[in-house]
Amino acid sequence: MKAAMKPEPLSRERIVAAAVDLIEREGADAVSMRRIATELGVGVMSLYNHVPNKSSLLDGVAESVMAQIEFHDDISAPWQEQVLAQARALRQIAMHYPRCTLVVLTRQLRTPAGLLPTERALATLKRAGFERDQAVSVLRAFVAYIVGCLLREVGVTSTFDPAGGGGSIAGSFDATLFPETADLYGWLATCDHEAEFEFGLRMLVEAAAVVPRAPSNTDEPQS
């Protein structure tokens, strides 16, 4: 008679994986230590041997997602191509974990997985000749753009997106008061997220390329 398989030992990795799966199914609001224990079929107190609290668990979720980013940028390629590749890698993981991406955007990670995208981007920009303060400013501009695009793609913000994730604004406004909106409605009502992401990304790269590389503030920032 075949012996029953022993259940997989409880570990931080198993707990985090269960949280990732739950978030992708039901959203981050569904996460609680008790719910995760139920998902794993264990007692809730046993979780605390591996994860001290919910906040730590969500940090683990963010770290797990960030650790799966696959960077394929070639440091021998032009810096513009490296930046494009890095941004695409971030978008790719976000599309794979859309709901967990919202968790990532709310956590402040100081782990290797969390800091790697920043480190790679800054190294690329410094090699491109940007001064230290310029590299940080350019990075922040790209991060703001990427985060905004991701929030729109995962359906969080539609206030300034008339398409509303595929919805319709037809008949909800007076065309005589908003003639340009009415004229361009056919384009406003649809959105190819990937194409729009690429358009804006390339526009940012082209804008960054003309930033003068003259030193502006190379001193250490005041604390």
Image (cartoon, rainbow, N blue to C red):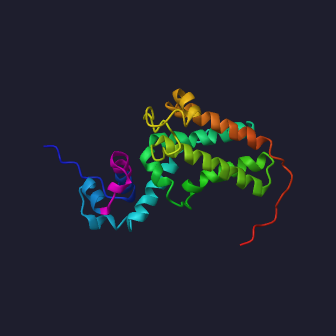
Residue 102 visible? The answer is yes
Q: Please give left or right for residue 112 compared with residue 213 in the image.
A: left
Residue 34 picture location, percent across and down: 27, 62
Residue 113 picture location, percent across and down: 55, 54
| Residue 64 vertical position relative to residue 185 in the rendered view, above or below | below
| Residue 57 vertical position relative to residue 73 in the rendered view, above or below | below
| Magenta residue span | 20-33
Q: Please give left or right for residue 64 compared with residue 28 in the image.
A: right
- Give me the residue at 86% from left, 52% from top: 214
Residue 216 in magenta stretch:
no
Please state which of residues 7 and 159 is positioned toward the viewer in this rendering: 159
Residue 70 visible? The answer is no
Please state which of residues 59 and 48 is positioned toward the viewer in this rendering: 59
- Give me the residue at 60% from left, 56% from top: 115
What is the residue that sits farthest to the left in this orientation?
1
- Give me the residue at 18% from left, 48% from top: 4
Please state which of residues 161 and 120 is positioned toward the viewer in this rendering: 161
Most prominent secondary structure in the magenta stretch?
Answer: helix
Residue 135 picture location, percent across and down: 74, 52
| Residue 67 vertical position relative to residue 85 in the rendered view, above or below | below
What is the residue that sits farthest to the bottom in this orientation?
223
Residue 210 picture location, percent across and down: 80, 42
What is the residue that sits farthest to the front in this orientation?
176
Residue 27 in magenta stretch:
yes
Quadrant housing the N terminus: top left
- Give me the residue at 64% from left, 38% from top: 201
Q: How many discs mark residues in the rendered view?
A: 0
Quadrant housing the C terminus: bottom right
Quarter assignment of residue 50: bottom left
